[in-house]
Image (spheres, rainbow, N blue to C red):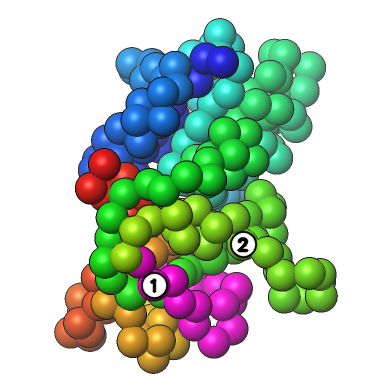
Amino acid sequence: MKIGLFIPCYVDVVYPQVGVATYKLLKHLGLDVTYPLNQTCCGQPMANAGFEKQAIPLAEKFEDKFKEFDYVVAPSVSCTAFVKLNYPRLLKGKHECTTSKKIMDVVEFLHDVVKVNHPLGTFPHKVSLHNSCHGVRELGLSSPSEEHVAPFNKIKDLLNLVEGIQVLEPERPDECCGFGGMFSVEETAVSAQMGLDKIQRHMKTGARFITGPDCSCLMHMAGIAKKQGLQVEFKHVVEILAAGL
């Protein structure tokens, strides 16, 4: 199978190490992965701000860029969810939409398609797992508490393959950190307080690191932690999965 690696713009600019770790991990697993050059934003920021028409040309370019691949894999649950759920509507009557059917978050892809079940890297630390809202409620990476279904967590399943790790979860594990894209801009005080509350619950686990599948949530909490002088570190889950390989 041919895999097209999509690295969202904010990952490329702010957290390039996450993109590199994703590529290295996929290659380590013997997968045929390509990073198409001249990628652009998927259009999520424009659409979330109410300017959907400005997202359409980006969706069309995304379709063209990744049309040759069997899967499109990205280390970002929010961008993945946007393409998966919104592209069919944005491109309706304008362009055949294929990427919505084949895009997957890297955690979902490794867990459900590759079905990784052998030891990965080494990370001898306690980590507190952050379940981002898009991952929980739109991509099904873990069980949402409000639905009262049998508990599952694909992120935790993969992390438990890492040698030396201790995976912990905070109280109210699937509650929002307060980022929410435009929400953090329009409701800054509420967003910041939600983030601080979430960080404090993570820290009560005794973990040195907070990890999760979306850099945007981690970026939001990391900014608050730095401003408050809190001693905790943040790593995308794929950085931990690839550590020591």
> What main secondary structure does the magenta stretch of the protein show?
loop
Residue beneath label 1, please?
A: 166
On screen, residue 124 versus residue 100, left or right, reads left
Quarter of the image with the C terminus is top left
In the displayed orientation, state which residue is furthest to the top. 68
Residue to which mark 2 is pinned: 153
Amino acid type, residue under disc 1 in the picture: Gln
Who is closer to the viewer here, 245 or 38? 245
Q: Are marks 1 and 2 in contact (CB under 8 Å)?
A: no
Q: CA distance from mark 1 to mark 2?
A: 15 Å
Other residues around mark 2 within 10 Å, as few (<14) / some (14–19) / many (≥20): some
In front here: 117 or 155? 117
Q: Residue at x 30, y 32 (%)?
A: 24
Query: Is 154 above or below relative to 125?
Result: above
| Segment colored magenta | 165-185
Chain-order first, disc 1 or disc 2 = 2
Circle 2: element type? loop
Kindly report which numbered mark, 1 or 2, lies closer to the viewer in this rendering. Answer: 1
Whole-percent x, y for residue 127 in the image: 36, 72
For residue 184, side relative to residue 117 (left or right) = left
Q: Can residue 146 be seen here?
A: yes
Name the residue at 53% across, 45% down. Answer: 117
* Vertical placement of residue 95 versus 124, above or below: above
Against 66, is 154 above or below?
A: below
Q: Is 195 part of what is drawn in magenta? A: no
Q: Which quadrant of the view contains residue 55?
A: top right
